[in-house]
Amino acid sequence: MIAKLLPFRSEPAEGLCHREAPSGRTGIRSFAPRRLPAGEPGLPSLPRQRPILLLADREPAALLAACRHLEQAGFEVRRTSTAAETATLFSTVRPDLAVIDSALPDGDGFELCKAIRRTPEGRETPLVIAADAEDYESVRKSQDAGASDFVLRPINWLILSRRLSNLMEADHSRRRLRASRAMLREAEEAAGLASWSCDSSTGRIEWSPEAATFLGLEDPTDGRPEAFLAAVHPDDRPFVEAEIRSAARERRPFAAEHRIRRPSDGTVRFIRHCADFSLDDDGEALWLRGIVQDVTEKVRAEEQIWRLSNLDGLTGLPNRAMLQHLLGYALPRAAHAGRLVAALFLDIDRFEEINERHGPAEGDKLIVEVADRLEQCLRRGDPVAPSPHFERADSLARLSGDEFVVVLTDVEVVDDIARVAQRILDGVSGSYRVGSAEVFIGVSIGIAVSPQDGDEPGLLIQHAQTALFQVKRLGRGSYRFYSETVNDEVAARVDIETGLHRALERNELSLSYQPIMDGKSGAVSGFEALLRWTSSSLGAVPPARFIPVAEESGLIFRIGEWVLRTACRQAEAWAEEGLGSLDVAVNVSTLQLGHAGFADVVRDALRQAGLPPERLSLEITESALLAHDEKTVACLSDLKKSGVRLVIDDFGTGYSALQYLRNFPADGLKIDRSFVDGIVRNPGDTAIVSALIAMSRGLSITVVAEGVETEEQFRHLQSLGCDQVQGFLFSRPLPAEEFRTMLSSGASPGVTEAAV
């Protein structure tokens, strides 16, 4: 009898949605408007324009180094160095998130985290613990303290700033979703619940009108259990029938949720059943009663919540949270099987330029197309990390912006990973349509392999991103595996960038001056100002090491302006001393030329120094010669109109196109030292230098030969009619005071020992 009366399930079955049994309410709760008490979950609070980040660290220097990265990431940083200050500031400022050192001078960071969690303002604020060791005990204590995340000291602020932004996004999403769930629960409590009952003597089910409507029964008076089973979705019917038998055997109350397909209109809905029954002394059912509720919207809302939490909204790919899940699932399985797992961290080369030129909407379309091509590359049989949350196994995730991660599992040899990386480079790089324009893009890939590069998801992704940074530094458009050497190089670059932030304030930057000689008379006609940096912590840092870091970090704008103003002031100061009205040459980055207002900075520097514009030469690279960027071209034209001289540096070593010289507003060019070095012994170099001098004379362009180290080279250049020369034959770059002494002596510089 009971088997005929129990068309419901009480235990979850794999592959089907299941929910907890309700508390037994069968009516509608009376409802009156009420104000939510402070701190009670309700509507999400509006986010600040700049989220406040509380940064507690035992080392004040580390706080200062972090500020630039975090503020550029959009945070307003509040800094503390003690537990007491942190607790006080947290209660007054109420930050949006906090990074707390585990070992503050006056207190344990884990205990501080616990204390904050017990306060109303800190109950849900994202908290990140920074510890000195990434061991089991530190992770356990972080979890016990209620931390949202864990990071290893010393902190890589470049990477952490991204993680904190993602943590903030997840927190806002969680608050919005929690509010949505709270409102959904209120609606459920106020909703009417349809009912049914069954008399064991007849075996027939009596449906309330609401229940018949929910189920879409064609004949509400048909009380046969088979009538109900006919309304169950065909895919769920075997499960429901199995649950009927299970409930009959176990003689228990139950709750069931499954789909129905309404016979009346064919629509598919989710319903929830809850039932209880009484048994006689023989264990037979006397009666059975239950409630039924349409929970379709709730199920769909939960599905949407899951998607928002785990999938990228633009591409539909797994997001960072799901990527952690995929790796967390794959890593232990691979370790048990003795296989490798690889994380390939990739992004689009120069995507920021494309996004800025064509707009965010077109940039998003490009991201989607790149994601499609990546998926096509991975559909050729690559091993992937399976997940029960997906209908198909997925090996590709989008973290943010143009950043993607490919997960490869069950890998036997590293060569297989390299082949996949090359396939991605070949498949994704190429032509794309962005708006009405055609653009060619490439990608760069950093690779980390478990177990040698880390057996924890976050560490593996971090190391893959570190390898990507190295690829970017070496020129983009390729892939590179992570190694300790790569990590050390990236760490060294971070140290350089950190030091550069304080170099101007600490007066660690200086200029050295190298004379430029007249090609005919051999007299000093000008000088080149060369930037030098002696760091209090790193010592003397070669320009080849710190200039690229300054360009990548954006510090080149501040440093370049300082160089320009200092060199102009120095040139005019020597002229006022009667040491000659010498021309001054300053190297300028292509980034500076593309920066808004650079021409105004140059004019202001000349005005403040009192230096005539024709005495200033800006030395630019050949890439500026070939640039088609409108901002760069406009800046060069503006500078030319101001009377400033433009000189192409290291001419002949890059991708020079001689035809551009006709339209480019150049006043001079520097022949690279590699040609000067072979001018005496190599007829080919002699021919190239001779041709450049002849061409420049026809275009009224001044020619400077750099790297002159011997009298023979100098005489040879004189015979070819070179306008100016520069090199160690005459002088190495000198500090300002030594250069002044040389000028005041009245003697022309002569041969000097070459400096390294």
Image (cartoon, rainbow, N blue to C red):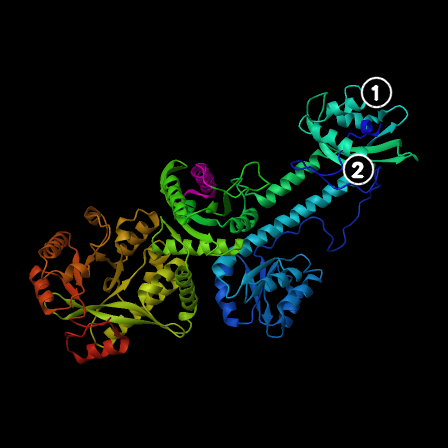
Where is residue 752, by image quadrant?
bottom left
Q: Which mark is residue 547?
A: none
Indicate the amino acid at tag 1: Thr
Which quadrant would the N terminus be assigned to in this image? top right
- Main SS class of the magenta portion in the image: helix
> Which residue is labeled 2 in the image?
254
Is residue 102 toward the left or the right of residue 553 in the image? right
**Image depth: mark 1 or mark 2 in front:** 2
What element does badge 2 sit on? strand
- Measuring from the top left, give residue 590's x and y in whole percent: 32, 55
Q: Quadrant of the C terminus?
A: bottom left
Quickly name the residue at label 1. Answer: 221
Question: How far is disc 1 from disc 2 in space, using C-alphas?
Answer: 25 Å
Left or right: 355, with 265 as reference point:
left
Does residue 378 belong to the magenta stretch? yes
Where's residue 85, x and y in %? 63, 71
